[in-house]
Image (spheres, helix red, strand yellow):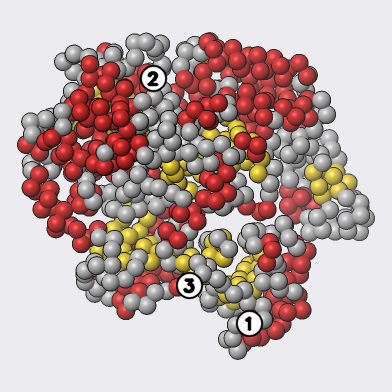
């Protein structure tokens, strides 16, 4: 194995000057070889580095020197100066300004500048397996405060006043929910933490549980005190083994310290928490199905009312809150409802954690004040779309949410504004789509998911989602008629009206929002039999451009089904009947002679 | 069972361990070890740091595993705070790089700039992983 001392990165982005970057790469390689440095210096071609106006760029590591506007004829001089004489070639060097170059502090990144971390306050700072570290950063101080100086009524009033709304998606006032349960005069009540995070691409709850489990335990205990419950459950997916492990460690440590169990802190209040592992069914994130699952029954939703706050787990009043909701409780108690109310917007106070994913430069976990616009989130915090592609839409709320297009990007993120756009806050997945994504295919993907995850209890969801999926598949195969789009819309609206639980009621959202925002794409599929993003396989063809094909035969040798034929040094042809549209030939062709149409 | 006084005692005793400020008295090394970090190879990085710290016989060093800081694409991330100095974040770490950081930054205080983020016009350029590292 070679151990290289340095790496030279050549930006191979397609946005600026791709033909030159190929030449640059080859010239660099041969120049390095000429100086017999190939064993020490590695030359790499990268994807677009996003610096198109400086392009073509060459970066040398470990020094971190960036050469900009490099031409092929500069290479010999560059290699000789930089690698033989160990001198940076100043003529081409990019002069870094303030805040550029080597950055030692994560907080200096644009990614962190607009963030405000409340729920994630301890994530990445403390050791989640060490209760002392949590306690030191004001941990269990809120519990102390509540048990020594606040009545249950005051706690609930405080939470109500803060304007905290459920972070799991629905956005119901947390204080109101607690109040309903507190009013019930029953011998037993329960607190449940819903950690059954099932949206594709979402990992907010997992990160909180893995990074700061005690904040959830403390908040659940406070909740128990407020509504008069002595028992809590955390319903977490078994597919989050690390979160489960760290939660169990946290629970054991809290019990050892007497922060869970009997007579907490000597104040005469008892509360304990148990873990319940879910097998990963999406529907078990729905509160009534979740409770069935905890009871040991099959995870299926029940009609509401009665609401869980009146009759929930084993028929007793039960509060179910999401992980992130609980993670906000402790700061509210410590810093006061007014402080929390002052963050975010009038109707949605506080912050929201999002998992940024899809076609975005900075994938990761962010926490932003409510009211931040989608544009700020995607382009300033998220760093925009990689590879110089064009933004098309952002999907929020997972399979229950919808797509938001370019024209609505300046909408501030709030529960109600997102709902008005036909999407929803959801638990916080945010998937960015670019021009290469087909919106019909996106809707099909989510329907495929909800069809699989439908529990089958009510007919609209069990059969309706399947019919929706079939219609979408027909469209992606180019076999649909124009009236099918209207039928699709009609059925989607019906399912929304009559399905039993949240899963079924929101399952048609991806279809409805894509039809609303991108009707032209549906029409292109149906009427013109074309997929504008060239994603739907049945509607694209692979063809060889006659003027570019050199007849090298590379594609013929690599085609698994023998669909490409042609004599050497003559233009080749693809047999459309045999072609499986795997894309191997495009990938392998050195002359960019094969295109999708 | 702990009382409120006991918790205060813990806060006093553990304060230096978690102190994020420059007035720390010990060196704190944290490795991002949520699922994203571990998937990127944080386990090996953590082991390498523990091993190197022991090998060099360094005392007064706290090594902690921590959760997700948010920038999953730069994992494994190692952050180091030495007494009297600002926090330094190293990104895209490997066991080899981690050992070198311990031997230079933690031992003698020389920050290894080449393993920090390289930012040009708001873009982080050195966020790639090398196979043979």
**Which residue is found at the position 20% from the left and 25% from the top?**
A153
Q: Residue A195 vs residue A518: left or right?
A: left
- In depth, the one of B67 and A163 nearer the eye is A163
Residue A352 bears which disc, if any?
A: none
Label 1 marks a residue whose chain is A
Q: Are marks 2 and 3 in contact (CB under 8 Å)?
A: no
Q: Position of residue A380 (x, y in %)?
A: 55, 51
The reply to whether residue A290 is visible in this rendering is yes
Q: Which residue does the numbered mark 3 point to in the structure image?
A: B114
Same chain? Circles 1 and 3: no
Residue A90 bears which disc, if any?
A: 1
Q: Secondary structure at mark 3?
A: helix
Whichever of labels 1 and 2 marks the residue nearer the N terminus, that label is 1
**Which residue is found at the position 14% from the left and 57% from the top?**
B12
**Which residue is found at the position 82% from the left and 50% from the top?**
A594
Of marks 1 and 2, the one in the foreground: 1
Q: CA distance from mark 2 to mark 3?
A: 52 Å
Categorize mark 2 by other alpha carbons within 10 Å: few (<14), some (14-19), many (20+).
Answer: many
Q: Residue B40 vs residue A119: left or right?
A: right
Q: Secondary structure at mark 1?
A: loop
Q: Secondary structure at mark 2?
A: helix
Q: Are marks 1 and 3 in contact (CB under 8 Å)?
A: no
Q: Position of residue A570 (x, y in %)?
A: 93, 55
Residue A289 bears which disc, if any?
A: 2
Q: Position of residue A241 (x, y in %)?
A: 35, 41
Task: List the single residue furthest toward the bottom.
Answer: A85
Categorize mark 3 by other alpha carbons within 10 Å: few (<14), some (14-19), many (20+).
Answer: some
């Amino acid at each position: 194995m070679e151990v290289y001392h340095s790496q030279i990165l050549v930006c191979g982005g397609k946005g600026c000057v791709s033909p030159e970057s190929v030449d640059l790469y080859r010239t660099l390689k041969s120049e390095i070889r000429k100086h017999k440095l190939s064993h020490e210096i590695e030359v790499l071609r990268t994807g677009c580095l996003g610096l198109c106006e400086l392009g073509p760029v060459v970066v040398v590591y470990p020094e971190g020197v960036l050469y900009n506007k490099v031409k092929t004829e500069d290479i010999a001089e560059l290699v000789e100066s930089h690698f033989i004489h160990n001198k940076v070639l100043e003529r081409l060097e990019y002069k870094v300004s303030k805040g550029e170059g080597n950055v030692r502090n994560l907080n200096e990144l644009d990614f962190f500048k607009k963030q405000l971390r409340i729920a994630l306050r301890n994530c990445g700072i403390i050791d989640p397996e060490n209760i002392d570290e949590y306690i030191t950063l004001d941990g269990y101080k809120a519990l102390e405060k509540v048990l020594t100086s606040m009545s249950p009524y005051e706690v609930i009033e405080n939470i109500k006043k803060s304007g905290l709304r459920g972070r799991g998606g629905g956005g119901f006032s947390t204080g109101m929910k607690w109040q309903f349960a507190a009013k019930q005069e029953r011998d037993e009540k329960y607190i449940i933490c819903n950690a059954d995070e099932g949206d594709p691409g979402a990992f907010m709850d997992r990160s909180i549980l893995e990074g700061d489990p005690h904040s959830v335990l403390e908040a659940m205990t406070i909740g128990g005190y407020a509504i008069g419950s002595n028992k809590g459950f955390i319903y977490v997916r078994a597919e989050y083994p690390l979160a489960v492990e760290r939660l169990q460690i946290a629970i054991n440590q809290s019990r050892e310290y007497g922060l869970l169990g009997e007579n907490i802190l000597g104040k005469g209040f008892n509360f304990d928490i148990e873990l319940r592992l879910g097998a990963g069914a999406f529907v078990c994130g729905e509160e009534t199905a979740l409770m069935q699952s905890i009871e040991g029954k099959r995870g299926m939703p029940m009609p509401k009312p009665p609401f869980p706050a009146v009759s929930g787990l084993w028929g007793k009043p039960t509060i179910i809150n999401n992980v992130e909701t609980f993670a906000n409780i402790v700061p509210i108690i410590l810093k006061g409802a007014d402080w929390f109310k002052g963050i975010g917007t009038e109707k949605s106070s506080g912050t929201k954690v999002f998992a940024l994913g899809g076609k975005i430069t900075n994938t990761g976990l962010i926490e932003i004040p409510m009211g931040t616009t989608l544009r700020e989130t995607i382009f300033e915090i998220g760093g925009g779309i990689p590879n110089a592609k064009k933004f098309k839409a952002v999907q929020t709320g997972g399979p229950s949410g919808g797509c938001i297009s370019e024209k609505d990007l300046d909408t501030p993120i709030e529960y109600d504004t997102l709902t008005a756009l036909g999407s929803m806050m959801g638990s916080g997945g945010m998937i960015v789509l670019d021009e290469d994504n087909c919106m019909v295919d996106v809707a099909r993907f989510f329907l495929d998911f909800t069809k699989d995850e439908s529990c089958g209890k009510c007919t609209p969801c069990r059969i309706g989602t399947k019919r929706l999926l079939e219609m979408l598949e027909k469209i992606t195969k180019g076999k649909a008629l124009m009236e099918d789009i209207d039928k699709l819309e009609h059925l989607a609206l019906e399912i929304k009206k009559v399905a039993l639980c949240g899963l079924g009621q929101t399952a048609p959202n991806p279809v409805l929002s894509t039809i609303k925002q991108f009707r032209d794409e549906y029409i292109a599929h149906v009427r013109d039999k074309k997929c504008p993003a060239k994603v739907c396989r049945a509607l694209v063809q692979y063809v060889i451009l006659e003027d570019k094909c050199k007849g090298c035969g590379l594609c013929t040798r690599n085609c698994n089904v023998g669909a490409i034929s042609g004599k050497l040094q003559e233009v080749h042809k693809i047999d459309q009947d045999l072609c499986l549209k795997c894309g191997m030939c495009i990938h392998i062709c050195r002359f960019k002679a094969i295109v999708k149409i | 069972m702990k009382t409120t006084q006991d918790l205060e005692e813990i806060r006093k005793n553990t304060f230096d361990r978690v102190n994020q400020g420059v007035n720390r008295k010990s060196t704190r090394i944290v490795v991002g070890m949520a699922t994203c970090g571990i998937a990127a190879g944080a386990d090996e990085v953590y082991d390498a740091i523990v091993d190197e710290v022991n090998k060099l016989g360094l005392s007064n060093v706290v090594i902690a595993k921590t959760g997700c800081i948010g920038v999953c694409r730069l994992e494994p991330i190692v952050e180091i705070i030495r007494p009297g100095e600002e926090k330094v974040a190293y990104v895209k770490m490997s066991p080899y790089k981690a050992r070198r950081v311990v031997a230079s930054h933690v031992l003698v205080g020389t920050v290894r700039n080449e393993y920090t983020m390289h930012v040009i016009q708001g873009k982080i350029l050195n966020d790639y992983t090398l196979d043979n590292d």
